[in-house]
Structure formats: C-alpha cells, structure tokens
Image (cartoon, rainbow, N blue to C red):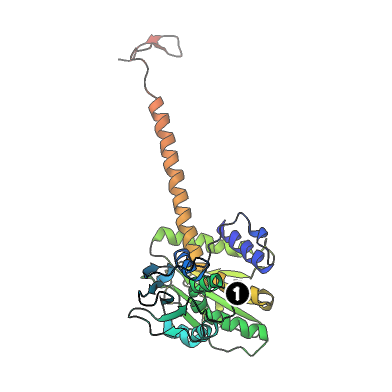
Amino acid sequence: KFHLNFAMAWAAKQQGGASAANGLMHLESENKILLECLTSRLGAEKKREPCELKIADFDDVLYKVFVSPDSPNEIVLHVAVRDWENLKSNGAQKALDTNFPGCTSQPEQGFNVAIKVNADSLPKGPWGSTGEACAKQLADIKTLLVGAPLAEAFSTLESGGSASSGITTIAMRKPTQDGGGNCYIVPKGDRVTVVFAVDFADETDKAVTRIFLQEFVEAQRSVNNCPPANFSRGAEPPMEIQSIPNIDGNPDIAGFISFTIFKSHIGTTPKKKEATKLLVHFLTYLQYHVKATKTYMHMRMRNKVNALLQVLNRATQTSNETKAKKTITGKTWVKK
C-alpha cells in the first residue's frame, strides 16, 4: 500500500508533524554516504585529511568529493545530473548562487557542477550557519538542482504571479526502449500540475507499476490535504500535456501519473520545500516499492513451495501390503 503511504506522508509533511507518518516507509532525500563524508569535515569533528570519493545515486546522479593534500580545509564537490543545460536555464543556477554564493568552480570532465567550500570559512546561505547544516544541504544537492524548475513554478503560484503558458520538460532519468523518464511541469493561474511519464524495462515491473499508479486515484479519497492524483495509460496522456508533439508516441510505457498542486499545498516555505522534495524523489520512491513488492512475492512463492515439499515428503507409502477391497455387491477382490 505504498500509494497510501506516500499520500499520508505528504499530508503529514504538509501539517508539519512527523508523528503522523510514523511507521511509514520514507526515503530520506540526502545521500547518506555523501552526508557522512561531509559532516566529518564540516561538522564538530573537523577532519582535515585528503579525500577522493566517488558516489553513484539514483536517476544517474554522480558525486565526487575531492580534498587536496595541499589544502585539506577546502572541499570540492563535483555533481553530474541529467539534462543539466535545461535545469540551468530553469532555476538551477539561480538556486546554486542563492545557497552557495561565490562557491562555484570549474567542474571536472563528466560533471556539470563543482562547489568549493572552505571548512574554516563557511558560505552564508538560507540553510543556516553551522557546518552540519552546510553538509546536509550539500548532501541534498540533487533536490536543489533537479527540483529548481518545480521550486520556480511553486514560487510563482505562491506569489500569485502570472503563470507561463509553456510546459517545462525535465529528463529525470534515462528512458527505456519504450520511452518514459520525463517530468512535465504545467503552470496555471491557480495550480501547478506535475506529470511523470513512468516506465520500466522489465514487463513485470510495468505490470506492478500500473497497479500502484491506479491506486493513487483511490488513495486521495481517504487522505486529507494530499494533492489530487490521476493515472492514465501510455496511449492516453493527460489533457495538460497533450499539446506536446508526439506525446502519445510511446503507448507501451507503464503510464502517466499527475499531481495537481494548489496554493494550499505550498503556502509556506517549509511546505514548498517538502513538496519539491517529495516530487523530485517520487520516481525513486516508486522504484523502491516496485522492487520490494517483487521481493515479497518471491519470498511468498518460495515459502509456499517449501510447504508443499514438506507435505509431499510426508506423503510416503508406509506399507507394500496389498489390501483386499469389496465391491458394492459384497464380492472381495485383490488388485494385481
């Protein structure tokens, strides 16, 4: 029931309470390995030693932490994300300049962004002033960059400004042979509709995904304060994105899931941040539960097979003696 968990987690986050989401599976947005590495150098431990660490994350995101032996107090974080030029022109560069002013540098080959931070003189940003807060923001750099177009659309909606009539398309992950992997942001005057084109390479994953996505429509009826959700097949894209050329050219994808965000969902800064975070990591959340469901089904099947084998082993013949049988007329006969 991950669809219900996602909706309840959204509602709990919107209400500002963590207790409402207790017991629900929630994937943290920060990369844990990256957070541990940065906290040890920017936090109270103040580790000052050379380091070169490469990390791969979901959605083809790559990180590289480099600390030179000549400058152990300077930490350089290189980041590679998909569709960087598109993200850059839709708010990602602005978000970088706001959160890490004067910290950008030339990235290495294969990376899109490089952030240089001096552990002895931290930059000033909206995330706070402590080393731990800086490390947490750097570990969540994926949300900052990939979620920049969403944050821009939400800010326009929150301020009541005029919405652009254009649709922003973000390639969030590598498409399969049937397509998918894109996120479409459709701003309107009183709402922002976010549409995901979802697909998996494995046919079983597609079937499980379709069931999950269909249940989002049902989940919204029992959970308050969550955004309306709609599911449609690959051959029938949502009305909001039907103007995109060839949008119905991938009928074999798992389908489209759309969330309609109203001003009440992003009325405060914490709400806007949580909405952006949940949407950026939605495909990862979906992928996790698809794989977890398959694992659970395989475990159930293996347990059932083991139970049947035990029954079969107990069903051995205990005697070779041939028993006499009687017919309905009372005659006795022995099978030879």
Q: Where is mark 1, residue-wise?
A: 273
Seen at 51% across and 67% down, the residue is: 30
Q: Quadrant of residue 111?
A: bottom left
Q: Quadrant of residue 13?
A: bottom right
The answer to whether residue 247 is seen in the rendering is no
Q: Is residue 246 left or right of residue 110?
A: right
Is 292 above or below relative to 149?
A: above
Percent across and percent down for residue 135 are: 51, 71
Quadrant for the C terminus in the image: top left
In this view of the protein, which residue sits in the foreground, 33 or 272?
Answer: 33
Percent across and percent down for residue 33 are: 44, 64
The answer to whether residue 211 is seen in the rendering is yes
Dot 1 amino acid type: Lys
Seen at 42% across and 82% down, the residue is: 84
Percent across and percent down for residue 305 are: 41, 38
In this view of the protein, which residue sits in the foreground, 2 or 133?
Answer: 133
Q: Is residue 34 left or right of residue 99?
A: left
Task: Pick out the residue farthest to the top.
Answer: 331
Percent across and percent down for residue 60 are: 40, 71
Task: Pick out the residue farthest to the left.
Answer: 336
Seen at 54% across and 72% down, the residue is: 131
